Image: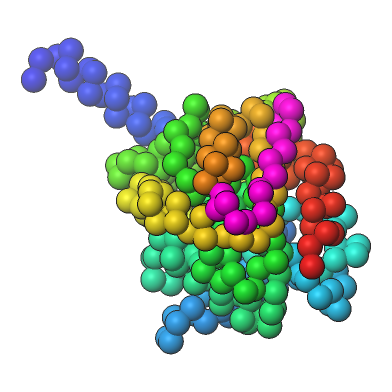
Amino acid sequence: MTAWLLRLLGLLLLVAAIAVGAFKAPDRTLTSLVPRWAPPPSQFVELTLSEGLVQITHLRDEGPREDRLPIVLLHGTSDSLHSWDGWVKELSRTRRVLRVDLPGFGLTGPAPDDDYRMAAYTRFVRALLDQQQLRRVVLVGNSLGGEVAWMSAAALPERVAGLVLLDPAGLPFEPDALPLGFAASRFAPTAWVSQFLLPRPLVKQSVEAVFGDPTKVQPELVDRYFEITLREGNRRALGLRVRALLAERGGKPYEEAWRSLRLPVLLIWGERDRLIPPRYAQQYLDLRAKDAEPARLVLLPGIGHVPHVEDPAGSLAVARPFIEGLR
């Protein structure tokens, strides 16, 4: 090996060592995260997914218990139930609102069987409704949570009164821009490395990428995403979830599930969503069954992929009349 190759190898090793030293981020235990991210009214409940398979789930249940049509909020990929804080603050004054960390994310952490296919998520929703003895609910979801919501409604039509879907996944789309954290999880080598390294600037960039106005992203919001991502097992779970997504990729079963829906649907989309651009919203209207009530679509100017985080008041103002009209 020539001298210049040796020098180059030495430089690369030095850079790698500096990167590891600067961005090394070991997993954090659930116990260490609970004081900051799961004080009351947080609780941890056991959901029986199948015989012998139990998911310990981070849950918040707020508002009047006598509400006859509770609202269940489902977050998106790499997010947590905290993303609904702005909505819950207002909704829980008059409505019972439940929100959970989905398997693979938040403080719920990894699925016990490493299954992150959509069928596993709909099974999780069924287990949640059963455990909480919820006969009928309104399902609200963003991104992955939107996909879980409408696929669960297709599987459990008698238990869902209506859907509010904020920039939902499920039907085919191609992103205009992919957050770096998501991109890294698409490939096995970078997904493996990300289990040990987590640069805070990468987290910041990923959050900014899903906002219509990146200047709205505050340090405390980045802190939340950064710390909860470090919950033990979450980074590995993200890689598995992305691979499950790429393997399923929507298609005919998803179209058939969407066409099967007859219940009222409100679609809310950020006009500046670059992850699931608003041009893909039209397919949800076009594929609606002719004998179903037409779905309504509302575009939010200047807003990105997470309207309930970027503009809680504005997005809730659109959703609330729809929710209150459901019976």
Query: Residue at position x 77%, y 70% from top?
Result: 70
Residue 136's spot in the image, x, y percent?
70, 74
Which residue in the rendered view is the most extreme toward the bottom? 51
When the figure is inspected, residue 98 is found, relative to residue 273, above or below; the finding is: below
Which residue in the rendered view is the most extreme toward the right? 93
Can see residue 102?
A: no
Quarter the N terminus occupies: top left
Q: What is the magenta segment's predominant secondary structure?
A: loop
Q: Quadrant of residue 300?
A: top right
Asked if residue 290 is among those painted magenta in the image, a careful observer would answer: yes
Asked if residue 12 is among those painted magenta in the image, a careful observer would answer: no
Question: Left or right of 90: which side holds 260?
Answer: left
Which residue in the rendered view is the most extreme toward the front? 291
Query: Residue at position x 44%, y 56% from top?
Result: 256
Residue 308's spot in the image, x, y percent?
73, 45
Pick the residue in front: 115 or 164.
164
Residue 165's spot in the image, x, y percent?
65, 50
| Span highlighted in magenta in the image | 288-303
Pick the residue in front: 302 or 13.
302
Residue 213's spot in the image, x, y percent?
70, 26
Tell how many labels: 0
Query: Residue at position x 79%, y 68% from top?
Result: 327
